[in-house]
Image: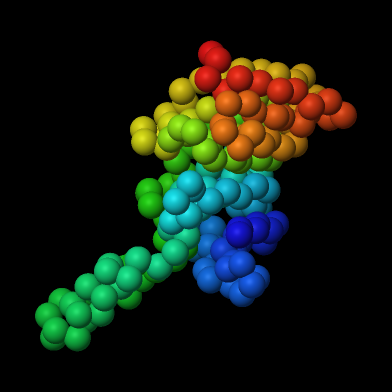
Amino acid sequence: VISGSLDGKAMVWDLALQPLATLDLMQQAASLDRRVLSVCLSRDGTKALVGTAGAELWELTAVQDPEAAAAAEAEEGGGGAEGDASAGAAGKSLHEGPVVAGHYGRAISGIVASSAAPEVVTVGSDGVVRVLSTETHKTARLARVAPENVGIQAAAFSPDGSRLAVAAGPAIEILDPSAP
């Protein structure tokens, strides 16, 4: 389970709602607006995607990597060069900055991972649906489905990933996520 807040933090929780990790965008590189408006875990639960009011999509580690943490600890204890104390830590950015800065400078209001393909969908206050490849981090497809003054508030895939529902104002649109 993952949640986000306007203070720039996202939290990963276990099923008993005990905190597992805090992902703090305030500790990341410069950002246009770090208020967290949407969050999503990767299909395997190891990465968190965090959408901000600054139209940025950040990819962060959602769980601690025990091998990287053990290697850093061994390096520190080995008397050699100091290891990276944060190696393997949850909440670390996987890139130098945001993966995507888009939605025409408007907020990313929803993120959802596909269950059928290595893709995520972002929706925003600009009324655009963007399908992004999780492998290349590039936009695979996009479409404007709502007027800019309405925007899109949320998105959800059907369980088999063949349909995408988007909420735009009082309307819900059902889309084929593979269509251009």
Q: Is residue 30 in view from this perspective?
A: no
Q: Position of residue 129 (x, y in %)?
A: 62, 26
Q: Where is residue 125 in the image (x, y as percent from the top left)?
A: 72, 32
Q: Residue furthest top?
A: 180
Q: Is residue 48 in view from this perspective?
A: yes
Image quadrant in which you'd find residue 90: bottom left
Identify the residue shown where x is 54% and y is 13%: 180
Q: In this view, does 64 lie to the left or right of 69?
A: right
Identify the residue shown where x is 48% and y is 46%: 43
Quarter of the rendering occupied by the N terminus: bottom right
- Compared to residue 32, the image places residue 153 above or below, namely above
- Compared to residue 86, the image places residue 38 above or below, namely above
- Compared to residue 101, the image places residue 143 above or below, namely above
Identify the residue shown where x is 64% and y is 52%: 36
- Compared to residue 58, the image places residue 23 above or below, namely below
Number of numbered discs present?
Answer: 0
Image quadrant in which you'd find residue 55: top right
Q: Where is residue 128 in the image (x, y as percent from the top left)?
A: 65, 24
Q: Residue furthest front?
A: 160
Camera-side residue: 126 or 117? Answer: 117
Q: Is residue 89 left or right of residue 151?
A: left
Identify the residue shown where x is 58% and y is 26%: 162
**Colour scheme of the rendered structure:** rainbow
